[in-house]
Image: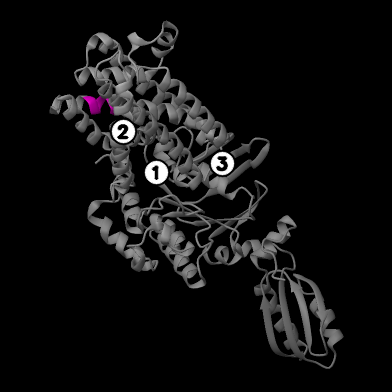
Amino acid sequence: MSSVTRIIWFDLKQELNPPVWIIVEWIVFAVQVSVYGALISNLVTSMSDYLKFYAVGLAIMLTFEIGSHTGRHFVEHAHEGRLPYLLSLPIPRWKLFLAIALQGGFELALMLIVPLCALQVIIGNLTLVSVFSAIGTLFWLGFGVSGLMLALSFIAFRSADVYSAIVTALSTLIIRFSTVFYPLIFLPPSYAGVAILSPLTYGSDLVRLILGFDPSILVDPGIAVSVLTALAISTLGLGTLLLQRLVEGVKSG
Amino acid sequence: MFAVETKGLTKLYGKTKALKELDFTVNEGEIMVLLGPNGSGKTTLLLILATVLKPTSGIAKIMGYDVVKQPTRVRQILGIAFQEARGFWRHKPQEILRFHATICGVPKSKREILIEQVMKDLELWDARGKLFMHLSGGQAKRVEVAKLLVQRPRLAIFDEPSSQVDLRGKRVIWDNIRKLRDEGSTIIVATNEVREAEYLADRITILDQGVKVVCDTPQRLKDSIAGGDIVELEIETQNLNEIVEEIRKIDGTFRVTPLDVNHLRAYVSMAEAWVPKVTSLCYRNNVRVVSIRVTEPSLDDVFLHFTGKALEVAPS
C-alpha cells in the first residue's frame, strides 16, 4: 500500500466505523427525491419525467457540497494540529495534497454509490458499466471540487468567516447557474452564457449521458470530459502551490 | 559534518521576528536541549527543521540536506513529537502508532513488537483500546512521544516532551529519550523546564527572543558563572576573621561572608577545584573543618546570568 493510500484509508475507515454519516446522506437523498423531487416534478410540464433529471442534479449538488467540505476539513486539521503532523511525514507535499483531495473523492463515492444505484434502477439502466462510469464521473468532479476548495482554503487561514461567505456565494452561483436542475436548452441565453462556465454543468450532463438521458439536451460529452479533467488537475495543482507557500509560511498547529 | 546546522536562520511572522540570524549546530549522537521561555523561538526553530515551516532567510541543514531544497529527504531522516498532541481524535493510540510506523517505513516484521514494547514502556498499554479523545493530557502526550520511540529516526525532535505528564511519567519519558540517544539517534529537546534540561542535556543552547544567547555543556555553563558556586563551611577556630581573610586570597573566591562564629559562606567559581584548596588552608592553619556543603548554580541561575531574566517563576 502506498503512502497516499495509507493516508486516505487511515481516516476513511473511521468514517465507516460505523458509517453513520454515509447512511444519513443516503436517507437525505431518498427523502429529498421522494418528497421534494416528486412534487416539483408534477409542477414541471415542459419536460417529461423531470424527477429523474432532478435526482441526478441532486447527486451533483451533494458532490459539490461534499467536495467543499474537504477544504473546511483541511483548515480544521490545520487548527487542530493534524496538518503540521502530516506535513512532517516523509512523503512529498504533492502526494499529501493528492491524498487529501482523493479522500474527498472517495468519501463522495461512498456517499453516492447507493443513491446512484437506486436512481439507475428507477431509470432502468442499472449495469456495472453505467454504475462505474457515473461514479467515476462524480469522483472526478468531486476530486476537482475538493482541489478547488483546497485552493480556496488559504482564505480560511486568514478568516474562517470570509471563507464561509465565499464558499456559500460560490456554491450559490455554481449550482444555480448551471445545468444541475435545468437543461441548458431551457435556459434563457443570459443564464446559459454563465452556465457553460460552471464545472457542474459538465459533471451533471456527463452523468446524465451515462445514465441514458437524451443527448440532445446535454452538453457535448467530449468537452465535458475535457473540462472535468482540466478542472481536477488545475485546481489540485493550484491548491498544492498555494498551500505549500501558505501553510509552510505561517505558524500553525 | 554536523547532524544539524543553521546559518543566519531568520523567521518572520508578519513584522514579528521569531528567529533572528540564528547560527546553531548539533553534533551527531548528542542530546541538545533548547532552553528558553515561551516565545523564545524554540518551536519555530523545530518546525523549520522538520520542514513544517519555511524560513524567511538563512540556511538549515539536517545531516547535510537542506530543509528548503531537499525537504522530503530531510523528513526521511527525522521525526518530531509536537508540543501539542492533537489531531486524531477518533483513533486509538495503537492505530496512531501503527499508522506512523508504517508511513515512516518501520519494517513490518518489527512494527507490532516495537509498538507493544513502547506502549508498555510508556505505560500506555492499558489505554490502547481507548479513543485518543478519551485519553488524559499526560497520556496523549505520551502517545506523541511514543511515535518517535517507535520510529527511531536518525534525528529525533521533542518539543516539551514531558509537559502535562506527572513526575513519574516524566522520568520514564526522559529515560527513554536517553536510551534512544544511546542507540544512535541524535536528539533535540526543546523545553522551558530546568529539571528536564538538567536530566537530558549533553549540551544546552539558550534561546531568548529568537537569539542564541549561549551554547555549551551544562557543567561549563554553570562554571562560567563567576562566583556561581556556593560553599558553606562549618569550622572550629578561635579566630574566624583571620581565616576568612586567608580564604579570600584563594583563587576563584568572589565573596566570603561569615554567618556566625563557626559558619561562613563563600561564593566561588568551580567549587570542585576550590574546596581542596580551602581544606588544605584550614589544615595548615590548624582549623578543623566540621562540614562542607556545596551548592551548584541551577540552569535557572545560568539563564538569569546570561539573559538577565528568570526562566522559571518562583512559587509565591
Tell me how far mark 1 sits from mark 3, CA to CA.
18 Å
Residue B45 visible in the current orientation: yes
The answer to whether mark 3 and mark 2 are in CB contact below 8 A is: no
Tell me how far mark 3 sits from mark 2, CA to CA.
48 Å
Count of numbered labels shown in the rendering = 3
Label 2, secondary structure: give it. helix
Q: Is residue B258 left or right of residue B219?
A: right
Residue A3 visible in the current orientation: no
> Which residue does the numbered mark 3 point to in the structure image?
A251
Mark 3 or 2, nearer chain start: 2
The answer to whether mark 1 and mark 2 are in CB contact below 8 A is: no
Label 3, secondary structure: give it. loop
> Label 2: how many residues lie within 10 Å, few (<14), some (14-19) or many (20+)?
few
For the residue pair B199 and B224, the one nearer the viewer reads as B199
Magenta-span inclusion, residue B71? no
Relative image position of residue A152 (x, y in whole percent) = 48, 28
Tell me how far mark 1 sits from mark 2, CA to CA.
47 Å
> Label 1: how many residues lie within 10 Å, few (<14), some (14-19) or many (20+)?
many
> Which residue does the numbered mark 1 point to in the structure image?
A89
Depicted A206 relative to depicted A156: above or below: above
Residue A74 position by quadrant: top left
Mark 1 or 3, nearer chain start: 1
Three-letter amino acid code at the position of disc 3: Lys
Relative image position of residue A200 (x, y in whole percent) = 36, 20
Three-letter amino acid code at the position of disc 2: Val
For the residue pair B224 and B313, the one nearer the viewer reads as B313
Depicted A250 relative to depicted A134: above or below: below
Residue B203 position by quadrant: bottom right
The residue at the point 44 percent across, 69 percent down is B172
Magenta region, residue range: A134-139
Label number found at residue A35: 2
